[in-house]
């Protein structure tokens, strides 16, 4: 039972970060120029756009590894939540699409769903950062770099 619990705890975290590590991080490496080009749409200088892509790569790799390892995972999840919200606001701007429709083909509606997926991921990361209870924010603020101890198995918690 303990091995199954560990496997599920790891799998849940892997599913949460799997979009970023390895996929999005690898895409930034393989398609760096295109990524910088996309970032240049939101940032005034190419230098700043390049810096933002490098920062995004760092967030995706480091925060994913911290969450998977359970080291300062609550702070890493909070940073990831912010990252998901910022990327939604910068690159999933469905409200700017001229063809937003509720029926039929619509690039705007597709972008809306991408926006909502980013927000849903942010919600998952916030749940990881603050835990399931109402005291989560207070406990996070008391020890923001603490681990959630995701792979601890308490047999006597009955």
Image (spheres, rainbow, N blue to C red):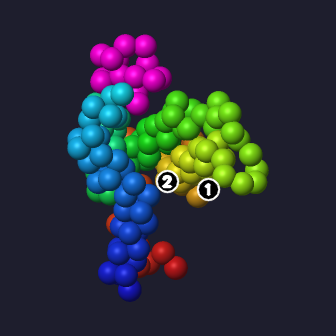
- Tell which residue pokes out farthest to the left in this image: 30
In the image, residue 15 above or below residue 33: below
Residue 56 picture quarter = top left
Q: Position of residue 70 (x, y in %)?
A: 33, 55
Examine the structure image and report whether residue 51 is included in the region drawn in magenta. Answer: yes
Do the numbered discs 1 and 2 sit on residues whose CB atoms are within 8 Å? no
In the image, residue 34 above or below residue 71: above
Front position in the image: 69 or 141: 69
Residue 152 picture quarter = bottom left
Describe the element under mark 1 as helix, strand or loop: loop
Tell me: 72 left or right of 91.
left
Tell me: 110 left or right of 72.
right
| Residue 128, disc | 2
Who comes first in sequence, dot 1 or dot 2? 2
Examine the structure image and report whether residue 40 is included in the region drawn in magenta. Answer: yes
Q: Position of residue 117 (x, y in %)?
A: 57, 51
Q: Which residues are magenta?
A: 38-53
């Amino acid at each position: 039972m303990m091995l199954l619990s560990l496997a599920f705890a790891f799998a849940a975290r892997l599913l949460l970060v799997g979009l970023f590590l390895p996929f999005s991080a690898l895409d930034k490496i393989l398609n760096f120029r295109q990524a910088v080009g996309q970032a240049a749409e939101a940032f005034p200088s190419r230098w700043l756009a390049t810096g933002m892509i490098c920062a995004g790569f760092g967030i995706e790799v480091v925060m994913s590894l911290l969450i998977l390892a359970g080291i300062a995972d609550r702070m890493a999840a909070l940073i990831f939540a912010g990252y998901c919200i910022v990327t939604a606001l910068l690159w999933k701007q469905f409200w700017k699409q001229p063809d937003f429709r509720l029926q039929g083909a619509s690039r705007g509606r597709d972008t809306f769903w991408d926006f909502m997926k980013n927000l849903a991921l942010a919600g998952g990361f916030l749940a990881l950062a603050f835990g399931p209870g109402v005291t989560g924010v207070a406990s996070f603020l008391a020890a923001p770099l603490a681990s959630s101890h995701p792979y601890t198995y308490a047999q006597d918690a009955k």
